[in-house]
Image (cartoon, grey):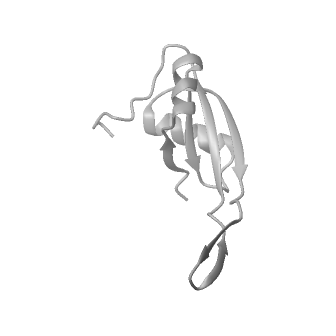
Amino acid sequence: MEILKKPLLTEKVTKLTEKLNRYAFIVDPKANKIQIKGAIEAMYGVNVEAVNTMRYEGKLKSRNTKAGSVSGRPSKYKKAVITLKDGETIDFYSNNI
């Protein structure tokens, strides 16, 4: 099971990173907080202070086309917001990983 899918790099998360030293990741829906903490510490070599998780269900979306109304859902996912200890950072743009 690959626990970390990808980091979230949005405006809102960037503000969290600058002010509170928090980072967000899309993670496996079956992963728990202990597994997420271990995966981040192993991959990035940092000390994680706290892990908060959120589950998102795909919203129902519909659009009208020539063939009629088409409806569906984006896939569901789980987001983890991690807080690092003071003085530690994660650099997503380096080529070391």
Classify residue 19 as left or right of residue 59.
Answer: left
Q: In which quarter of the image is the C terminus?
A: top left
Residue 68 picture quarter: bottom right
> Residue at point 55% right, 14% down?
86
The location of residue 44, given as percent across then percent down, is 44, 34
Q: How many labels does the image show?
A: 0
Query: Which residue lies at the image location 71% right of the left edge and 50% below the top edge?
Result: 55
Name the side, left or right, on which 56 lies relative to 13: right
Indicate whether 70 appears above or below 29: below
Residue at the location (58% across, 86% down)?
Answer: 67
Q: Quadrant of the N terminus?
A: bottom right
Front residue of this view, candidates 48 and 71 = 71
Residue that extends furthest to the bottom in the rendered view of this protein: 67
| 49 vs 79: above or below | above
Farthest residue to the top: give it.
Answer: 87
Picture layout, residue 66 above or below residue 92? below
Q: Is residue 47 visible?
A: no
Q: Residue 92 in the image: x percent, y percent?
A: 39, 35
Q: Decide if residue 13 is in sight here.
A: yes
In the image, 63: left or right of 41? right
The image shows residue 72 at horizontal and vertical percentages of: 66, 72
Find the residue positioned furthest to the left: 95
Residue 2 x/y as whole percent: 52, 56
Question: What residue appears at the point 57 percent right and 37 percent down from the top-left corner?
Answer: 24
Q: In this view, does 70 lie to the left or right of 21?
A: right
